[in-house]
Image (spheres, rainbow, N blue to C red):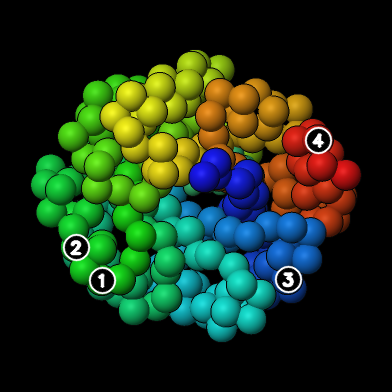
Amino acid sequence: MPHPIILAPSILSADFARLGQQVREAAAAGASYIHIDVMDGRFVPNITMGPVVVRALRPLADELNLTLDVHLMIEQPEQMLPAFARAGADILTVHVETCPHLHRTVQQIRELGAKPGVTLNPATPLVMLEEILPYVDQVLVMSVNPGFGGQAYIPASTEKIARLRRLLHARGLRHVAIEVDGGIHPENVREVVDAGAHVIVAGSAIFNDRASVAENLDAFWRALGRP
Ligand code: DX5
Ligand code: ZN
């Protein structure tokens, strides 16, 4: 079965004083995932949010049928996985750069009842994920260096997505979803979808003061050919 295209607004760029309302607006405009960027000030040069935010959004996610897609940009993620799972994360994505025992970490995520995702920085080659692909539900291709919203898309990411798609197809792993994160906006979303991405993360292109969340999501859907 082909993967549907999913828009996953990253709340990193949301108005935190009105977080629940912003998530409701995103859901009403067709978002089905909410992407939660967790940063520790060590793996990446920024500190953001922890399990408390996942816990706060869980009832809303249940009400609106949203998937909480948690992107862990933290060192030693295995220590924090139980807390994020208990808080209600649906997908837990770890960076290969932070996991010397990635197979064990992915198993831990499954045992905790969440879906495992793996990701890699723009300069990390895809080959680092080759052995783990059969064990994961989602692979995230980072198209900026993680740490901040609002950065420019790194053009070589498109070819990396296409290579990942070929690799998954060659290995009989078409069920693994391909996610892309960083610098995605209505002008380049078609390019990453054509390359093979199914889950589209966007922060600053959805939560900004130029237009409403609904207008910004509509622009994505129009770019994807859906009125
Ligand atoms: C970057 C984060 C992204 C970020 C994307 O470190 O992983 O999820 O929020 O933001 P934009 O869409 O503004 O590049
Ligand atoms: Zn992210």
- Residue 153 visible in the shown view: no
Look at 61% across and 31% down and name the residue there. Answer: 193
Q: CA distance from mark 2 to mark 3?
A: 31 Å
Residue 21 locus on image (x, y percent): 74, 73
Q: Nearer the viewer, residue 152 or 224?
A: 224
Numbered badge on residue 108:
2
**Residue type beneath disc 1:** Leu
**Residue type beneath disc 3:** Arg
Which-is-in-front pick, marks 2 and 3?
2
Helix, strand or loop at mark 2: helix
Answer above or below: position of 117 versus 79. Answer: above
Numbered badge on residue 148:
none
Residues under numbered marks 1 and 4 in contact, where contact means CB atoms less than 8 Å apart:
no
Helix, strand or loop at mark 4: loop
Q: Residues within 10 Å of mark 2 (few under 14, many from 20)?
A: some
From the image, tell me which residue sits under label 1: 112
Residue 97 locus on image (x, y percent): 24, 38
**Residue type beneath disc 4:** Gly
Task: Of the two numbered discs 2 and 3 on the same chain, state the one appearing first in sequence.
Answer: 3
Answer above or below: position of 135 versus 32. Answer: above
Task: Of the two numbered discs 1 and 4 on the same chain, state the one appearing first in sequence.
Answer: 1
- Residue most toward the front? 1
Q: CA distance from mark 1 to mark 2?
A: 6 Å
Residues under numbered marks 1 and 2 in contact, where contact means CB atoms less than 8 Å apart:
yes
From the image, tell me which residue sits under label 4: 225
Task: Of the two numbered discs 4 and 2 on the same chain, state the one appearing first in sequence.
Answer: 2
**Residue type beneath disc 2:** Gln
Which-is-in-front pick, marks 3 and 4?
4
Residues under numbered marks 4 and 2 in contact, where contact means CB atoms less than 8 Å apart:
no
